[in-house]
Image (spheres, grey):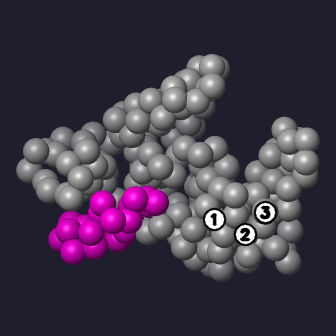
Amino acid sequence: MRILLDTCVLYPTVMREVLLGAARAGLFTPLWSNRIFDEWRRATEKKEDGFAAQAGVEIALTGAAWPDAMVPFDHADELWLPDANDIHVLAAAINGKADQLVTANIKDFPTRILTQHGILRRDPDGFLVELAHANPDQLDAVVAQVLSKANAMSDAPFTARSLLKKTRLPRLGKYMEPRI
């Protein structure tokens, strides 16, 4: 299953870590473009000092971990979406032969347009819950690792549910609550 990951699911960190952990576990093949990575980098520049430099390292490591995930966004001028700034995402999904597009930007990717290209739009929470139901042991391990890392960097400990809810993954958090 080939999944294009939009910028809004690569940043914030916890959501990205859960998604990429699932990809590392072999549950899907991630895809992205240089422009998606550029948007990720620009989003971090709006934060405190040091975030952009850290993002640069994370982007480089992510790209190196999946060297075949980078896809072009050619022919974007032939496509239409309600927000012209998102056309490059659709172009990358088409060029990467993505089965699905995972984005939190639901309104900007109408189903009727994506299905014309054989692409299913998914919100990150629903996508991850579906993966958790199909692969409970793998997702448990991924979330446990992300939770451990988050708690090591935090003064106040998180539960899986509180961490995932904070990261806009409330259904996954509810699913994981009794498990982790």
Residue 128 forms part of the magenta stretch: no
Q: Residue at x 16, y 45 (%)?
A: 76
**Alpha carbon distance from label 3 to label 1:** 10 Å
Q: Is residue 150 left or right of residue 27?
A: right
Reply above or below: 102 against 42: below
Q: Which residues are magenta?
A: 99-121
Q: Is residue 97 left or right of residue 165?
A: left
**Amino acid on which the number 2 mark rests in the picture:** Gly
Q: Is residue 64 visible?
A: no
Mark 3 neighbour density, 10 Å: few (under 14) some (14–19) many (20 or more): some
**Badge 1 local density, few (<14 within 10 Å), some, or many (20+)?**
many
Residue at the image position 14 percent from the left and 56 percent from the top? 80
Kindly indicate the quadrant of the structure image that contains residue 26. Answer: bottom right
In percent of width and height, residue 85 lies at 25, 45
Q: CA distance from mark 2 to mark 1?
A: 6 Å
Residue at (36, 33) in percent of width and height: 34
Residue 87: percent from the left, percent from the top?
Answer: 23, 49
Q: Confirm or deny contact between disc 3 and disc 2 (CB under 8 A).
A: yes
Q: Is residue 155 left or right of residue 27?
A: right
Judging by the rendered image, the residue that carries numbered circle 1 is 169
Q: Amino acid at mark 3?
A: Ser
Q: Are marks 2 and 1 in contact (CB under 8 Å)?
A: yes
Q: Residues within 10 Å of mark 2 (few under 14, many from 20)?
A: many
Question: Residue 24: where, in percent of width, then height?
Answer: 63, 51
Disc 2 target residue = 173
